[in-house]
Image: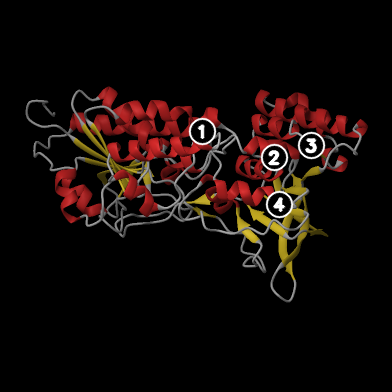
Amino acid sequence: MFSSNLKVPQVCIVGAGPGGFYAAMHLTKNLASVNVDIIEKLPVPFGLIRYGVAPDHPEVKNVINQFTKVAQKNNVNFYGNVTLGKDISLSHLRQHYDAVLLTYGAEEDKTLGIENEDASNVVAARNFVGWYNGLPSDSNLKFDLSGPRAAILGQGNVALDVARILLSPIDELAKTDITEHALSALAESKVKELYLVGRRGPLQVAFTIKELREQLKMKDCRTIWREENFDGVSDIVGTLARPRKRLIELMLKSLEENRTAKDDKFSKRFYPIFYRSPNKFIVNNEKKLEGIELTCTKMIGDKIEEQKCVPTEEQEILNCSLAFRSIGYKSINVDKDLKFLSHGVVANDKGRVIDDNHELAKMYVAGWLGTGPSGVILHTMGNAFQVAKAICEDINNSKDTDPKGGFGEVKKVIRNAIIDWDGWTKIDKYETEQGKKVGKPREKICDVEKMIEIAKT
């Protein structure tokens, strides 16, 4: 067992998003003695909270206050602008820490693998989210919003975030922390009709009731459902579990309101359509998107929760000049010592990483990197706490009395500027001051070099 007189366990967390901070919170609360170093590839913390949460959802970002309190503890350190697999290796971290926890998330998007997916106006929802949220790697992207009709392939909460940002009145977005470059582009947008395409039915949608309610209440935008998509749904709504039941009831209520709504007062339209799967993108001679060939699908099976989606021979063409792919994220392998399973997560047993010898290796994984990219921040919290509990158990049961050097040793091989918590507070102050000038909570810096410059001032 560790004794606080003999050795302070050193824990390294790679990734300063919600998974990393929740784990740090649990470790510092439940270990009598520990030093936690949080390493992040960007100069700024908070990961998905900063770069994934929609600008019009400021209440979700309030968790940053909790994370800030964790970071300000004497035994917690933040080291930004340090990239695993580039500036440091996993083997180096394992050499100098008692436990290494990977929580760097899922930063690539899944692809459809269909014809013409590389067309100029077929884009990843993930990149669009990064663009309007100021993620440095996406901030210089250009999106062609000059056509009247766009489509989003996928029906999760990210898809609805994209829909809301595209259809929201500009004066409402202008009060949020959306980036100035995105606000300017959206002000010029000509998109008036937006389709939300899902291969399964209303009973299987992945978005949650909060996001749908926001969509239905949007100013100057009418939601139009397809009546035939809801055949038989009202007959079984009473048998559903409560969260799903409430969601379906909201859809059915909106469908009913559709029947009597007057069309003339809305300038924008939102069309959720079900039982459609993209088969190929239709492009012109210049490889620009003109539409999507959709295969009609149907659900088979008696039990709703076990039904499978299968294609039919029927097809439909959806004309549009812009399409967003929103079918999920995937994690990337950043270090040769990591073992990924075929479905894109690190091989682990309840968070404990399994190495090539099928042995547990004082290495852990939490968040989307270990579970796959699903669930909301609450799920990430639960998972991070569970993995942090395993780290606490292993540290308390360890017979290793050899003190580890921690970041003091690791930083000897790092050549670029390391941004600590004081550096982040300077960036934070600068952003909030810039935001005040234009009536926003903050104006994010999108350039890494400028972040470093301000942090080092």
Query: Marks 1 and 2, Cα distance to the nearest angstrom?
Result: 18 Å
Q: Which residue is mark 2?
A: 168
Q: Are marks 4 and 2 in contact (CB under 8 Å)?
A: no
Q: How many marks?
A: 4
- Residue type at mark 2 is Ser
Upstream in sequence: badge 1 or badge 2: 2
Q: Quadrant of residue 214?
A: top right
The quadrant in which the N terminus is found is top left
Upstream in sequence: badge 4 or badge 1: 4
Crowding near the residue tagged with mark 3, few <14, some 14–19, many ≥20 C-alpha atoms within 10 Å: few
x and y percentages locating residue 282 in the rendered image: 74, 67
- Badge nearest the viewer, 1 or 2: 1
Res. 367 mark: none
Residue 366 appearing in the image? no
Q: Which residue is mark 3?
A: 220
Residue at the extreme front: 437
Q: Quadrant of residue 338?
A: bottom left
Upstream in sequence: badge 3 or badge 1: 3
Residue at the extreme left: 6
Q: Which residue is mark 4?
A: 189
- Residue type at mark 3 is Asp
